[in-house]
Amino acid sequence: MRILNFIKTFFRNILLHSGFSLLTLFGLSIGIAMSLLVLIYVYYESNYDRHWSDTEQIYRLYSYGEISGEAIRSAVTPQPLASVAAGSEGVEAAARLVPGARKLVAGSFNRSLESGFFYADPEFFEIFDLTFLEGDPHSALRDSAAVVLTRTTALRLFGEEKVKGALLTVEDSSVFRVSAVVEDIPANSHFSFDFLASWPEVEARLRKHPGDERAGMIDNWLHLNSYTYVKVNARADVAKLGRAVAERTSHEVEEQVAASFSGRGEEEGRIAIDFGLQPVSAVHLHSQLDNEPKDRASALYLYIFTAIAIFILLVTAVNFMNLTTAKAARRYKEVAVRKYFGAGRRMLILQFLTEAVAFSFLALFLALVLVEWLLPVFNAMFQIRMSVSGFIREPDTIWILVLTMSLGVLSGSYPALFFSGLKPWSALTGSMRVSRLGLVLRGLLISFQTSLALVLLVLTLGMAWQLHHLQGTFHGFQEDHALVVEWGGTDAQGLLDLKEGLLQRSEVAKVGLAEFVPGDDPTVVSFRWEGDSARVLLLALNYVDEGFFEALGAELVAGRWSRLSRDSSETAEVVVSASALRLLGQSGDQQQFLEMIGGRSSARDYRFKIVGVVADISFAGIKEEPRPMVFVLDREAARSEHLVIRLNNSPEGDAVVQEVWRELAPGRAMHYSSLEEVKAGFYSEEQRFARIAVVFALLALVLLLFGLIGMSAFLLQYHQKQLFIRKVLSAGFKDLLAYSLRDYWWFLGGGMAVGLPAAAFVLQFWLAGFSRIFTLPYYAYVFPIFLMLVLAFVVAWITGGREIRKVVDS
Amino acid sequence: MNPQVVVSKKLLSDIGRWVYVLEQLYMIHTRDLVKGYRGQEVATPVLINVNIDVGDGEFVAVAGPSGSGKSTLFNILGLLEAPDAGSVVFRGRDVGGLGESERLALRRGHIAYVFRQFNLVDELSVAENVELPLLYLKMKRAERRERLEEALGRFGLGHISRRFPRQLSGLQQQMTALARATVFQPKLLLADEPTGNLNSAGGSAVMEALSAINEAGTTLVLFTNSMQEAQKARRIIQLFDGHVVTDHAHT
């Protein structure tokens, strides 16, 4: 009953003082909404792969080891590993998953270039329980040339979901039969596919190339190319399983090393590959491996975000306290009367806590509306798929309620103690005075918020500065007027024809072919340098044609571009990147040869002469050190999968390329991007965090705004008596404003003094992850300070001005 | 004076024996009350050796000019503030050493207050203001309703019970304050210049209402600086510079 009375008074209070109450409510809502958004994001990221049933029994095998002192830690494993794992104690099922190249796929409704084409063992569905719309998990991948589609893919290619038995044409040459349709892979899974074809297809494709290393992949223990998953039984000892796998594989690996590096004695001991197990639910946040099927997230960022969410709530709560008690005088009378008529301290505490909790829930309601409204914006901004419905369900609903309740109690605690401790008669007579300590505490809060806002603003500017300059740096290619087009791994003749066709057009300046273009993750192969035969070197290998470097706009550092020799007895020429040359330790003696290890066919494909050095071409951005690379000339476009097209400066360039494509590759979907887009893509993750930082910086400013409003309101009340006295002594409007708000500027300035070095430190911390650093100019520090001063001045002028005018006019 | 006589049990310290004695019981009485306020540098004495006895059912006026210590005495008799020295005995219980919560327990349901500034809660309607003390007495809803209706009727507030203080005249506000003060049938009513913000007609109406409250059995202590109003009481205590100057019955 009393509670109802409290809530009634509370709402009447809001209505009576609607301006200030709405401000308080709005501040609280924004705080809750922002922390909810952050928590939804944290929840989304930390629940990767938790949707599989028995997810804690699913593990992924990974490879680790070293080659000539270079550590290997990779998510991909050799193909024979799965059968060893399957035969181990405690393993219920083991399956391989391997991504296929981008392919041209045709259904009855549509055809398109598809990148989500994967292959897997039949046991895959025993491990990952996808929802089957059609077909059944046991037989789906048993037959060769069987393919499982996801619902969206079926709709895209066939125009309907029920397509079991339908035929799918791949690259206009092979045909798959749809054996099942499954629900789309949940977005927060560490892998994602649109097609899952049966494993025999992999082996069939590899066997097409007898004599080269692709055929060897099937039983090669040194070729890391497929993901291996196991499901263990509930009582399995995973550590023991790991030891058993290691024991059973070490012999195989040793044998392979001996066979591949035969006769080279001493270095064999330096080649070691072992396999470990990691829980599948830990992949997204905690895996530190190369070659992941999807981008990982860092657990550190999630910890930071959780801390930020809690922090936002704390600041929100404190702002609430500030705002409610700043205008405390309004409620002195009510509190005093209640005390006179029998309200004890406990009862008043209860009243103010009830109010704060009611306020929090009101704010929660507004916050949920805000979240619902902002979520699509956030999803687009951070390139994720979060939803409120995925988050707000039991037991999370309870958590939200508990959180809101705690926020209410927390933010109501100070007002409750403050009001319940009032002496009724002094509250009534107005002889109440807030202690100096209260002033200092509020002031320190303002200082703190100022520092925080400054840190975030400087960080945001620093990130923007760094990313802007990184993108302006030469990446080893000229990104303007250049396109990269995907072709895929088949139909080499078609690719050569296309190149010729493009070169006929005046809008096209140059065309090159390559296996890998910037944005790809090139294969790494072990080489040996004849000048230093004891060392095995890991170098990225890219097959390119003679036109590649010029089409890309690469920069020749030394020597000349390589040329294809018609004389098969001559040693093939290669170009290496500047970093590869450094690794080789080459000293100008170009008579030595570079040899690819593990070659089985003619020496011509495996022994090279270095004729030129190219400035490092960045394949993944210049955050990290460039990957040393060898460019081998590709005969007859056998390995080329991309075209690099340099256009003359003509507005129709893109259209012409498309026209030629339609003419020479009819029916084949064209997938292309400009090199500018590719370059921007290198920094998409950093851009994402920069955008998050912008949001937090703006939020910090908004919170600071509320803090400043609360502080100025409080100061005016604190100095009220003095204001009247000074007014009587004929102080003017400006004198009174300056007098009452002088502490405000002190605390603001203090916050900035602390914030400035903190900002520089945090920015340095972020920049430490880059191999090249662009120092932020001093005016980037001055600007946020200026911005905050303007904000503070406006707040002082508006809130302070109004109150002072009342005093002046009274 | 109308002190009640009661029998109480006392320990005789010199012989260590319990005896029964007859004692006068006052509603409230003070002995050698001293109260001062400490500023940062100087201490200001406000009440000096004040001895006041208020019997059950009495109507006493405490009269004195501004600064004579009336407000401080109001707070001390109202059990809101503790004296620096001396004792205050409320209904036979020495409240000197009591903590805030114990004083609250003695106050609640026993002492009511009326102020010059009315002091109604702006956010509550007339009825809700009057009902407020009952909420803190944990009274059943039905009984609360009954008392409320009765109090509103007694002070002629029935037709304006849903209005808010800002919609009322000064007299209506003070009548609401009187209804609030008496709705729980207190033993002691302390009124601090209750007519100070009213015109003479309003003032007389309030004084009549106060007399009626006293006649119904509530002990009334009226704090005023108007001798004319003080004359309405049966006894006048004059306070000057913190001292009781005169204390005599008046007919």
Image: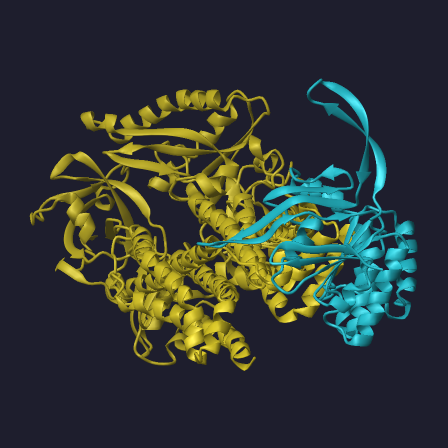
Chain colours: A yellow, B cyan
Disc tally is 0
Q: To which quarter of the image does residue A376 belong?
A: bottom right
Q: Nearer the viewer, residue A360 or A54?
A: A360
Q: To which quarter of the image does residue A621 belong?
A: bottom left
The answer to whether A83 is drawn above or below residue A27 in the figure is above
Q: Nearer the viewer, residue A368 or A183?
A: A368
Residue A471: give x, y in percent of width and height: 31, 64
Q: To which quarter of the image does residue B167 belong?
A: bottom right
The answer to whether A96 is drawn above or below residue A243 in the figure is below
Quarter of the figure with the C terminus of chain A: bottom right
Q: Nearer the viewer, residue A49 or A799?
A: A799
Residue A756: give x, y in percent of width and height: 31, 59
Residue B42: give x, y in percent of width and height: 46, 54
The answer to whether A750 is drawn above or below residue A504 in the figure is above
Using the rendered image of the protein, determine whether residue A108 is visible from the camera's viewpoint.
no
Residue A244 located left or right of residue B175: left
Residue A521: give x, y in percent of width and height: 36, 50
Q: Nearer the viewer, residue B88 or A610?
A: B88
Using the rendered image of the protein, determine whether residue A225 is visible from the camera's viewpoint.
yes
Residue B159 located left or right of residue A802: right
